[in-house]
Amino acid sequence: MDKNNTKTVFNKYLHPMDEGVLNKMAEQMELDKYVKKLKIIPFVKLFTYAQLKQISSLTDISLELNTTPKLQKEIGLKSISKSQLSRKLSDISPNIFQAVLKHLIQKVRQKFGVVKGNHKLRKLYLIDSSTVTLSLKEHPWAPKNRYTSGVKLHTRVVFYDDVTYLDDIIVTAARPADITQLDALIVNKHGTFHVFDRGYFDFKTFERLCSEGIRFATRIKENTVIEMVEEVTVPKNSPIIREAVVFLGKMKHPLRLIETVNSEGKQIQIIVNDAKISADEVSTIYRDRWRIELFYKWMKQHMVLKTMYGKSQNAVHNQVYMAMIAFCLTLLLESDLRFKGTLLVLKKHLAKFILDRYPDLLEELFKPPSRTTEGRKSYDYEKIFKETLIEVEKGKFRE
């Protein structure tokens, strides 16, 4: 039997992480120098498993490992206590998980960067932040207000050819304003297109982006000083209410001001420094900003982010990075499988089959539906499964 057929789903899932690279990182950081039991690779594997299965406490993670022989074999660890997990999670620096995440993000970029979008679907960098609220008593190092704490996830995602993927993330305490992280999240390359909300409104940054040919679109604040340069004629029956060329504040570069209506029927004003695209396309691009909101919603609902494993800053940051690592691994496997369903459906199947043989997952994913409906597009699921299995046996997915 081909050795690929004996590989588990978990083995294939973790493959992009590259144990060799992870070992080199651990050696450089001397993470395993005096460690006898819970070394970095078993630790990363176990917490990736916990994210995928949505195990929300260290007690349950310990119990899962201690009572599951298949998991013990995959992790390379027979047992672990809650206290050992807690100490490791707090003691280890988030730098290792940041490095692993950057390694996976680079693989995601390579995987999806070769996809050719059509003229309407351009590559967008969406920038926003989301706060994970915490207990002030348990996390006093990250005060949000008088009553709660929190960490803020300053994030850049890419929306391209109908795919949304993580491109960068900065984790801070909840209080720093969004604008403090904008420069770090901008892709400083001529022609790139960024979309962000009013929390990142800054004239100095806008001037720099205009000077360097970096495109952006955002909403203006209500008290913004606007100097009119020219009104632009808007076609009849257009969703655009108004278009004009303006100066904002004391800016030297002119911008386009476009007024339209959002999905809730509320009138909004968008500024953009791209003179070539149509006003309708600007409106569409700004609506695409909500893709990052959907990303945050997906992460909080389907990964372990609402409940924290530990109380220290290291523990919280490490958990956030591990959730993002699991997301990237899921996205990479989705691409390798050419799976046409949703990412959530794939994640549910992964959670169910994670310790089983890889071909078992393929058979489940590509099996024909139990019922068919006339008029709906049909797929030869049996053929797709057989072709995919042949590719596995030939070594196309081989490490």
Image (spheres, grey):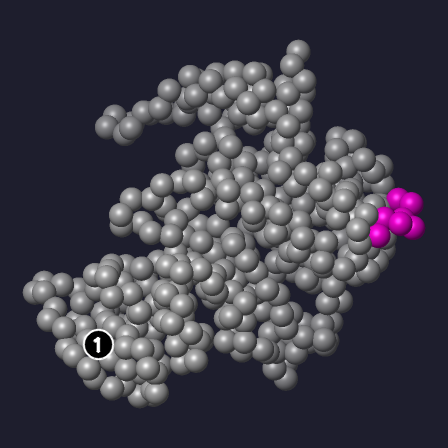
Q: For this rendering, which residue is in front, 142 or 105? A: 105
Q: Quadrant of the C terminus?
A: top right
Q: Quadrant of residue 75?
A: top right
Q: Position of residue 92 (x, y in %)?
A: 79, 57
Position of 229 with respect to 177 (left or right) is left
Number of marks present in the image shown: 1
Q: Which residues are magenta?
A: 30-37
The residue at 62%/38% (across/down) is: 16
Q: Position of residue 159 (x, y in %)?
A: 41, 52
Residue that mark 1 sits on: 245
**Image position, residue 392 (x, y; %):** 56, 20
* Above or below, 9 relative to 169: above
Q: Residues within 10 Å of mark 1 (few under 14, many from 20)?
A: many
Q: Main secondary structure of the magenta part?
A: loop
Judge left or right: residue 304 versus residue 82: left
* Residue 342 in the image: above or below residue 301: above
Residue shown at the point (34%, 83%) measured from the top left: 251
Residue 59 seen in render: no
Furthest residue toward top: 1
Closer to us: 330 or 227: 227
Residue 108 among magenta residues: no
Q: Quadrant of the N terminus?
A: top right
Q: Which residue corresponds to the image point at 21% horizontal and 64% vertical from the top-left?
A: 279
